[in-house]
Amino acid sequence: MGKWLKELQEWIPENQVLTTLADRHSYSFDASFGEHLPDAVVQAKEKHEVLEVLKLANRYKVPVHPRGSGTCLSGGPLPVHGGIVLDMSQFPAVIDLHPRDLTVNVTPSVLTGNINKAAEKHGLMYAPDPSSAHVATIGGNLAENSGGPRGLKYGVTKDHVIGLEVVTPEGELIRTGGQTIKNVTGIDLTKLIVGSEGTLGVIVGATLKLMPKPPAVQTIMVAFDEVRKAGEAISQTLTSGILPSKMEFMDHACIVAVEKFQPVGLPVSAAAVIILELDGHPETLRIERGLIEKIMVGMGAKEIIIPKSDDEAGKLWHARKQVSPAIAKIKPTKVSEDATVPRSKIPDFMDRLESIKEKYNVEVVAFGHAGDGNLHPNILCDKRDVEEMKRVEKAVEEMFQAALDLGGTLSGEHGIGTMKAPFMELELGEIGLDMMKRIKDSWDPNGILNPGKVFPERSEVGASSGVVC
Ligand SMILES: Cc1cc2nc3c(=O)[nH]c(=O)nc-3n(C[C@H](O)[C@H](O)[C@H](O)COP(=O)(O)OP(=O)(O)OC[C@H]3O[C@@H](n4cnc5c(N)ncnc54)[C@H](O)[C@@H]3O)c2cc1C
């Protein structure tokens, strides 16, 4: 290590290379629950520093793990093979709006929520709205192809990116896409990089699409006394000709947890609630609201709550955002999954979750972007309890299998990282996975960029999930 570290310190300003144990510990975890110590941390503040780090890493075959805010739920930024954590959150945060083009140029360290705030000043919006938008970086969102409640109507991060500036694993700066909405010049490298979880390049800039902000929104909360009824109401709404901008689900345990954490008056006796938002012209919203109420009554809703003001509506959406921190209070360890199924299969997936919960005697709570089939079953447990964690591991495997059996996928938005890598072949098949690996190998011949992510390591193929670490 001595030689490469010494050389690194020659290229990068001293105060941006962190090597004390305390500093390295601060970069050893993310919001999942693995822990791996890097040998050094580089806080990059300029593009040329990213280039130098990658060139040096190739010379010495040292792993480099890009990192934004570290809110990843699948172990993406963890230095599983030691080496360097490349912290991109200290890059100067620049939001350069072009309202007449409906685009914005950003640097990777910008917090996603701030892009939308800046756009709103011009009557525009940046549509992707992950619940972590106030803390996560756009660099992390691009690498994970993050989604949020508005994904139901407006799509996820990849649908809003038209160009990227990327440092390749070998330390060259490239520009993909451009500033235009239409662009079919060659193979779409932008889409290839988005969602590649920091394995194909380090994002140092992006051009994003903006959209006109809808003139009005209407929030509706609907409580059900049976989870399955809520699932069926979601399918029924989505086939009714109305496309809500958001359609979120919370089960009983989540409702109770949020009410204990930050009470807002959610119906604690309900088995589940759906919180949905309609957006568009006020007159259209009036008609659609009536239709939604009719559908929900027809599906046996226990209660329909219409907020009386923007403030009240804001509180409901805040409550939805508090689910993750609120359920984290229930038990010391939270295993968050985000298997996604075709929307028509949501009720079946909910049934499968219920039987997995009983079979393995584990505490499962569920919430998420149910409108696009993306549920977040969370297993609440204690990682110090070895016997319980064995059951958790089996339950997680069965959840993945259930999602795949129903025509779904391992991850809707949280990424594969380290946690789901062993299951990739299950979904993609041997050849499909090999084709992906060949792309990785041609971009990164020395395998230095974020190794141990997305692709199962040899020892992991066919092994258990590795969720217990
Ligand atoms: C409470 C909570 C709520 C969440 N809600 C949502 C949600 O609604 N929707 C959702 O999709 N996710 C959600 N997440 C997950 C997480 O916030 C997202 O995955 C987010 O995109 C991670 O951004 P980050 O800046 O924290 O990146 P990190 O966690 O630091 O890194 C994530 C991945 O991106 C890579 N990376 C980071 N920066 C770069 C870069 N500049 N270039 C290349 N690769 C890079 C890393 O190597 C890693 O693989 C939530 C997480 C928490 C804790």
Image (tube, helix red, strand yellow):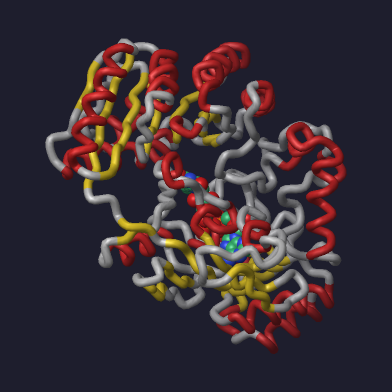
Residue 265: x percent and y percent? 21, 29
Q: Residue at x 43, y 52 (%)?
A: 128
Horizontal arrangement in the rendering, residue 145 relative to residue 393 (left or right): left
Identify which residue is drawn at 70% across, 82% down.
52
**Horizontal relation, residue 219 to residue 468: left or right:** left
Extreme residue toward the bottom, this view = 10
Q: Quadrant of residue 463?
A: top right
Q: Is residue 189 above or below residue 414?
A: below
Q: Which corner quadrant of the image does residue 282 belong to?
A: top left
Could you tell me which quadrant the C terminus lies in?
top right
Say which residue appears at 66% left-offset and 48% top-offset: 417
Q: In this view, does 339 lie above or below 88?
A: above
Quadrant including the N terminus: bottom right
State the residue at coordinates (60%, 86%): 13
Q: Which of 390 and 145 is in front in this view?
A: 145
| Image side of residue 205 versus residue 7, left or right | left
